[in-house]
Amino acid sequence: MSRSVERAVRVLELLSERPQHPAAVAEGFGVHRTTALRLLQDLCEGGLARRREDGTFAVGYRLAGLAQAALEQFDLRAIAHPFLADLGRRLQLTVHIATLENGQVIYADKVEPRTGVRLYSQIGRPVPLHTSGVGKAILAYLREEERERILTGYRYERFTETTLTTSAAFRAQLAEVRARGWAEDDGEYEHFVACVAVPVRDGTGRVRSALSVTALRAQTDLAGLHERLPAIRGTAQAVSRALGWTR
């Protein structure tokens, strides 16, 4: 990447966080103020930035339009599937990716090993938020107001002996998930199934999806899935990068 393009990209990243004064941009890049101002003006001419009345610069309306148009090219299932298939081949276990839609967590794709028992989960089907690894991995990273809106009035139905059945217990577990970076289902929906899940980030860094690996306890227990976390995390990071996450 040329130096000028790299600078333009970094300036746009700065402007996407908050409006910037040319002096702050110059200081951040270690260049003269006139150099920073010229770069900002070039971005304005292209519609990617705009100058505000207070002298600061913000992202341009054309950039917002381009971003919206680009989103139409991002289909989670199409992007994630090769990564899921590769992980499934390596682990010989069932791999899911789920996403948040209209307050529900929906399975977007599923890859199963060619041999063995097939799991009940179905693409397009919502999952119980309080018993699923993907549900926990997504909810744990939502903004508090969005999470509370989803959980207001939610019923914590018991399915097995390990199901969390109170709001307090569930919220405490979500805090643990966020602290350690992964979630699990310890036979909470079906006593003979275990699962671990990790968050997937989009191009803005938000967590709206999660990737999970699920196994019958006859195949491997929860401790065995914990041993596979490095591979699972690596795949989730690869999907996140494919979605535009760069951190």
Image (cartoon, grey):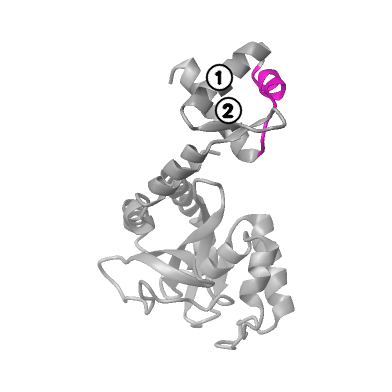
Magenta: main secondary structure: helix
Mark 2 to mark 1 CA distance (whole Å): 9 Å
As for residue 20 lying within the magenta part, the answer is yes
Instruction: Provide the residue designation for mark 2.
Output: 11
User: Do the numbered discs 2 and 1 sit on residues whose CB atoms are within 8 Å?
Assistant: yes
Image location (x, y in percent) of residue 72: 37, 52
- Give the magenta-colored segment's residue range: 18-29
Q: Closer to the N terminus: mark 2 or mark 1?
A: 2
Of the pair 80 and 3, the residue shown nearer to us: 3
Q: Is residue 156 above or below residue 101?
A: below
**Residue 97, located in which quarter of the rendered image?**
bottom left
Say whether residue 82 is visible.
yes
Please give the label number shown on residue 39.
Answer: 1
Q: Is residue 6 above or below residue 202?
A: above
Image location (x, y in percent) of residue 68: 44, 48
Amino acid at dot 1: Leu
Q: Please tell me how crowded label 1 is: few (under 14), some (14-19), or many (20+) other residues with Cα within 10 Å.
A: some
Q: Please tell me how crowded label 2 is: few (under 14), some (14-19), or many (20+) other residues with Cα within 10 Å.
A: many
As for residue 195 lying within the magenta part, the answer is no
Quarter of the picture holding the N terminus: top left
At mark 2, the secondary structure is: helix
Image location (x, y in percent) of residue 78: 32, 55
Quarter of the picture holding the C terminus: top right
Image location (x, y in percent) of residue 133: 53, 68
Say whether residue 31 is visible.
no
Q: Which residue is painted at 39% across and 45% down in the image?
A: 70
